[in-house]
Image (spheres, rainbow, N blue to C red):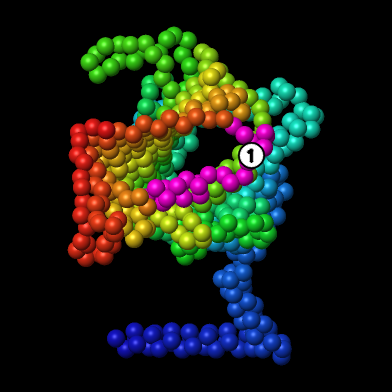
Amino acid sequence: MEADQLNLQETLVNKTNDHDSFIRDIQDNLPSSSIYVFFLSIFLAQAWVVYITLYNSRVFGLIITVIINKFVKYGHIKFGSFSFSVLSGKIMLRDFHYITEDFSVRIQYGWIIFKWWQKYIPKDLNEDLSHMETRVQMFLDGFQVHVYNKTGTYDRLDKLFGGTADLSDLVEEVTPAKNNSGLSNVNWRDLIPVIKVEMSSGRIIFGNHLVPHSLIFSFEDGHFTYTTKPASTPFDQFMHDAIGKADNFKLMFVQSNKYTGPLDEAPRYMGEGFIVLQTRKIDVHFYMDEPGIVPYEPESVELADGETVVRRTYPCLGMDVKCGKNTDINYGPWVDKQRELLWKFFYPADYQDMVPTEEAKPGEYRNYKKFEFMINLMQTSTVDILFTKDSETQAIHMGTGQGSYIEVTVPWVTSPEGYTTTVHGQLLLVDATTSLQYRSLVECETFEFTVKAFYPITWNGHQDWTCDFIACKTTVCLIFEHKHFFTDLINDWSVKTVPDIYHFVPYTWTINLQIKEFELILLTNEYNWIDTSSHQPENAHIAFCGDLI
């Protein structure tokens, strides 16, 4: 034991001597100015930490901006800051914008995660990939898309009216291009089967300083998922399927900045501008078949009863929108005029006859036939028709029940005669009142409407508009003042100026009104006096009832 203790003491003494000699060697070898080198190294280390923490992503963003703009020929891209992590597969960016002659895209902050560690599993072309794991996930804050011009359309009009373009070139620009995007290579679907995007806030803007008001779509807390599913027909490749939901959705007209022309005041401003549609929660479903090749043999479809029929099918294209609680819709003459101004700016008239769409031939990609849009009101909602009379706002206020819907069908092809756009809808448990002192107007269980607008192939040809209205179990209250009320509404909706020959289009309106199980109530007070008090009004009524009118 004594020998072991002596050995241990000798070892500790040797280590202490070695440590002292090491420090002594450093002190002997360092120059007298080593203190300055010490503080300089500390300063450089701190500067490097500050640079890596605060400025590296900004410098890297500047470098990425310069490199990308060397290769991008259309528009300008800028990254305020850019950073990435290979281990986590994450890319972070800040103050991003992409600006072109026609539109701009801006993102205040965002990140993208690509899960490269997930296994790559090849799938069949027509297999449903919606149940697979998400490989790409995105988060965007302050997302904004601003569409302010259509240079391609105006360039085509300049060539057309200037006479410098070949007519065949113009026809090629007008007719829809064939789908040659090369999506037959479906490896990208196997690599990225599902994409999820989260947005804390977003805005989509249409307009500029040349129009009095811009159209804005705004939402908060958006969640969107993109995937692919089997096509709706066996002759197409697959279906693009995007599902999204958001809170506090608003569709509104806002006065454009730097607009100097005449301004028509809105009937009513609500916050930033005139709100056309707002809802607390909105669900959106967009679907689109990826067109396949037209077969050389006739298409055969097997029905549910087993019968096989030969008929032409088309890829589907549509969007379904569901509005939740606190849904308000505001429309009227002023909104319709602003819509017309935006439409004329982004889709100016070329005064040319439309070119009929040719049916796709065998071996070519199939064409879409129509675009179907449907909006469903899932909860009790309000619809207001606003107009002005002598600078005073008048309104028709309607309350609708759960289950009301509006469906719009827009043709994607043009026949030799033209095309027809259809708007169909049904409002349930309608309760309509006016802004007059006597507010009662209409109550009905269901109100169904169908509007068909036929546009001929000639730009100024005769248009035919057909409106069908069907009301069931209806109670109508009429007074003489309603005549002046609706006259003012029609006058405000009508154009007060005489159109010139370059804008005049003849049209015919056919209105069909059918009321089932109706009750018409008229006031029969003495001396035509009406009690408009809100509580227990004292009025005499006479009712006319019938089964059909």
Q: How far across and down, in percent of the image, does residue 34 sit?
A: 68, 87
Q: How far across and down, in percent of the image, does residue 366 sit?
A: 49, 21
Q: How far across and down, in percent of the image, does residue 186 sit?
A: 47, 31
The residue that appears at 65% across and 46% down in the rendered structure is 149
The residue that appears at 62% across and 65% down in the rendered structure is 58
Q: Which residue was labeled with disc 1?
A: 499
Q: Seen in the image, is 183 located left or right of residue 222?
A: right
Asked whether 488 falls inside the magenta stretch, the response is: yes
Count of number-bearing discs: 1
Q: Is residue 31 above or below residue 392?
A: below
The residue that appears at 66% across and 61% down in the rendered structure is 258
Residue placed most toward the observer, 22 or 181: 181
The reply to whether residue 382 is visible in this rendering is no
Q: Is residue 227 above or below residue 370?
A: below
State the extent of the magenta-drawn residues as a range. Answer: 482-505
Q: Seen in the image, is 95 located left or right of residue 154?
A: left
Q: What amino acid type should be assigned to the residue bearing mark 1?
A: Pro
Q: Is residue 54 above or below residue 367?
A: below
Q: Label 1: how many residues lie within 10 Å, few (<14), some (14-19) or many (20+)?
A: few
The residue at the far top in this view is 297
Asked whether 235 falls inside the magenta stretch, the response is: no
Q: Is residue 484 above or below residue 471?
A: below
